[in-house]
Image: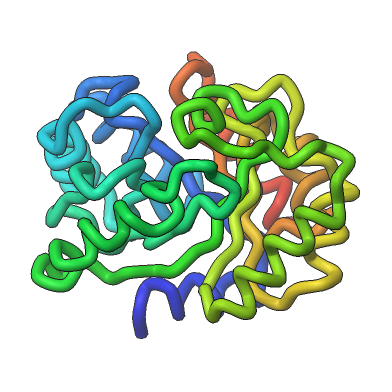
Amino acid sequence: MTIAGTIIELAKKKKLHFALLDPDKQKPEVAGQIAQTVTDAGSSAIMVGGSTLISQKQVDETCQAIKKNSDLPVILFPSGAKFLSKYADAVFFMSLLNSNNLGYVIREHVKGAPFVKHSGLEPISMGYVIIEPGMTAGRIGEADLIKRNDLQTAVGYALATEYFGMNFFYIEAGSGAPEPVPNEMIQAVKKNTSIPLLIGGGIRDPDTAKEKARAGANIIITGTAIEKDAHFKATLAHIIRAIEGL
């Protein structure tokens, strides 16, 4: 079974957690250590990517270090075609649907598609939107940020994603956001769509993760919380236990 197929089947049975590691935030050997920890804690996949990367070498070395320390799927979360890596297992072939820059909507995908084809990476299609406050991801991605109370627009993007035939829909408030995606938005999107819903940005503790999973998120993504929390091993284990219990 494909990685996407496995995730979809798992998401039907329980809530999942993905760890997002930014190669720009730590050295590869540290990323490898974090990968070991998130694997032991019960994460289902490790995403690799970031908004401020400067070289493919960063991504290659981070993916290699993760693979040495974890048997979880390594899925690229690239900000551009030049940050793809043959050392990952798959790539979220995602369109930042509410970007004002066509590069993030489709043109970077056209540049990167031949690499995906010849490297053997599994492409996993995903619609991706950023809501307020957006943080660095919103600024770098030149996103026309969805307002936090604009449920109709969020649902519209989610439905468009599903109608395009994409596998997943991801809403985030931006890494390090002071507030995560509102429960009402998650509920509205989940009520109107049938593909797995990923939620990230501003989720730092078990209670918040549980709240978002209960609202309808199938997959909870944490990134900055892992990188900055000195006690992240215990925190992550608590987050995963909290959402899996639903």
| Residue drawn at point x = 37 percent, y = 72 percent | 3
Above-or-below relation of 120 to 84: below
Give the left or right position of residue 154, taking residue 52 as reference: right
Scheme of image coloration: rainbow
Q: Residue furthest bottom?
A: 1
Examine the rendering and report whether any part of residue 205 can be seen: yes
Closer to us: 239 or 222: 222
| Residue drawn at point x = 29 percent, y = 21 percent | 26
Across and down, in percent, residue 153 comes to 79, 54
- Report which quarter residue 157 is drawn in: bottom right
Across and down, in percent, residue 124 comes to 39, 69
Give the left or right position of residue 192, taking residue 164 as reference: right
Can you say which quadrant of the picture contains the N terminus? bottom left
Across and down, in percent, residue 109 comes to 31, 59
Can you say which quadrant of the picture contains the C terminus? bottom right
Examine the rendering and report whether any part of residue 40 can be seen: no
Across and down, in percent, residue 227 comes to 44, 23
Closer to us: 240 or 93: 93
Closer to us: 75 or 79: 79
Badge count: 0
| Residue drawn at point x = 66 percent, y = 67 percent | 14
- Report which quarter residue 134 is drawn in: top right
Above-or-below relation of 109 to 82: below
